[in-house]
Amino acid sequence: MALQYASLGLRVFPIRGKAGPPKDWPGIATANEEGVVALWDRLPHENVAVKCGPESRLVDLNANGPAGKRTCSPSCSAASRP
């Protein structure tokens, strides 16, 4: 999956579940195929994270729990349903 995202020009980095991103993620996020392969050779069981922001034109909206649900617009709530 990481290579597929990178092929779209998205910078990716490994992430371990709820542990959060590594402290050096801005420096290791890459869209370079060789870089992606090297990262996942070292960390083969990690999940794939995509660097959000102006470069990727992606936004991460995290609306957890009741307060998040109340503040998220109806269209966001509908979009998050499977």
Image (cartoon, grey):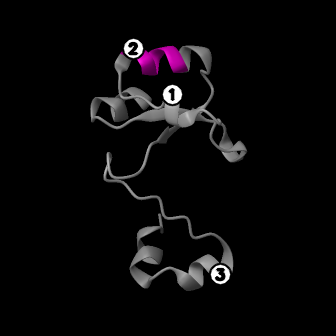
Query: Which numbered marker is on residue 72?
Result: none
Q: Is residue 58 above or below residue 29?
A: below
Residue at which label 1 appears: 28
Q: Residue furthest left?
A: 8
> Measuring 31% from the left and 53% from the top, which residue is drawn there?
57
- First along the sequence among labels 1 and 2: 1
- First along the sequence among labels 3 and 1: 1
Q: Could you tell me the amino acid type at mark 3?
A: Ala
Q: Which residues are magenta?
A: 34-39
Q: Is residue 61 visible?
A: yes
The mark closer to the camera, 3 or 1, is: 1
- Nearest the viewer among 40 and 26 is 26
Q: Is residue 1 visible?
A: no
Residue at which label 2 appears: 34
- Nearest the viewer among 80 and 63 is 63
Residue 63 at x, y percent in the picture: 57, 70
Quadrant of residue 41 within the rendered picture? top right
The quadrant of the rendering that contains the N terminus is top left
- Which structural element holds mark 2? helix
Q: Could you tell me the amino acid type at mark 1?
A: Ile
Q: Is residue 80 magenta?
A: no
- First along the sequence among labels 2 and 3: 2
- Which structural element holds mark 1? helix
The answer to whether 27 appears left or right of 1 in the picture is right
Residue at which label 3 appears: 67
> Measuring 49% from the left and 64% from the top, which residue is drawn there?
61
Q: Residue furthest right?
A: 19
> Measuring 47% from the left and 63% from the top, which residue is drawn there?
82
Residue 37 at x, y percent in the picture: 45, 16
The mark closer to the camera, 1 or 2, is: 1
